[in-house]
Amino acid sequence: MKLFPIHITNFKIDGGAMFGVVPKVLWQSKYPADENNLCNWALRSLLIDTGKRVILIDNGYGDKQDKKYFSHVYLNGGDGLEGALKKHGYSFDDVTDMILTHLHADHCGGGVKFNADRSGYELTFKNATYWVSKPHWDWAMNPNKQEGAAFLKENLLPMHESGKLKFIEKDIELYSGINLHLYNGHTIGQIIPFINTGDKTFVFVADLIPSTAHIPLVWNMAYDIRPMDTLQEKEDFLNEAVDKNYTLIFQHDLYNECCTVHHTEKGVRVKETFTLN
């Protein structure tokens, strides 16, 4: 089994939104903000080649929205989705499975693109099965007012209409060594993939723990719809990560791709950071 980081781009969003109730005087030492209070974050996906399946986890914003939309997220750096895959020797057509942790625009927008004459939409990964959790799909179709703007119909409906969308109802082993677990704090039914390579377990922590800065239990995003659930899910997961020596792979950490964790007097904290390579 081979794992590759797919660094699509970086993006800027409000530091207060990313750190919730944590005071700026604390978080700005880890993620410096500009004059508009914006911090720069990575938008990273994960490619898994099992030898039989080529699995991509999340796919970024895509490029369907207009200039006004992207003027709010300030995309910068990265290899682009297609470029990042090509960097590791893969193309869109090689992907057999597209796992979507959840359906916020920065996680799923790249899975649907304009067709040739821009009269409609088609799947970016034409040979892939698209996987999303059923609880999350149902939620995205009828979200609360806080989250509604994050679910764009042009990202979601073409997947369903294609017939390539399949649902995960509960925690499962999708393929040998690829286990999907559902979490509900950030959004209902977020999928967190656990990848067992035989000697190690890697966890793509998505928006459960966006960065190493979010490892302390109360350092959570204002975007989380159930913050107390996030706190409990993080505590349970991080204790398990220490006990089982998981390697955490970060989707949004600008500075660190991976880390391990250990117990300290202050709680679970970073033990070692490193790149996936």
Image: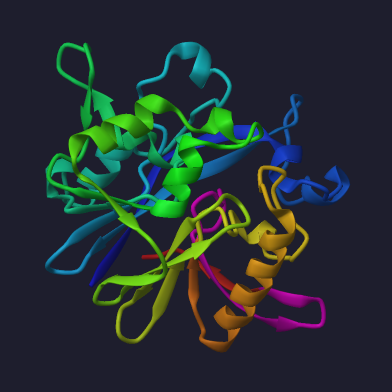
Q: Is residue 197 left or right of residue 128?
A: right
Q: Is residue 199 left or right of residue 96?
A: right
From what the image shows, is residue 75 above or below residue 173? above
Instruction: Please state, as top left, top right, bottom left or bottom right, where the C terminus lies in the image.
Output: bottom left
- Span of residues in magenta: 250-269
Q: How is the image coloured?
A: rainbow
Q: Nearer the viewer, residue 98 or 263?
A: 98
Which residue shows up at 57% across the image and 31% down it? 148
Any part of residue 104 in sight: no
| Quadrant hosting residue 38 | top right
| Quadrant hosting residue 54 | bottom left
Instruction: Please state, as top left, top right, bottom left or bottom right, where the N terminus lies in the image.
Output: bottom left
Residue 264 is a magenta residue: yes
Q: Disc count in the image?
A: 0
From what the image shows, is residue 44 above or below residue 272? above
Which residue shows up at 49% across the image and 78% down it? 246
Q: Is residue 90 left or right of residue 20?
A: left
From what the image shows, is residue 179 above or below residue 244? above
Which residue shows up at 61% across the image and 52% down it? 186
Residue 207 is a magenta residue: no
Residue 131 on image: x %, y %:
30, 52
Residue 172 on image: x %, y %:
35, 71
Residue 221 on image: x %, y %:
69, 48
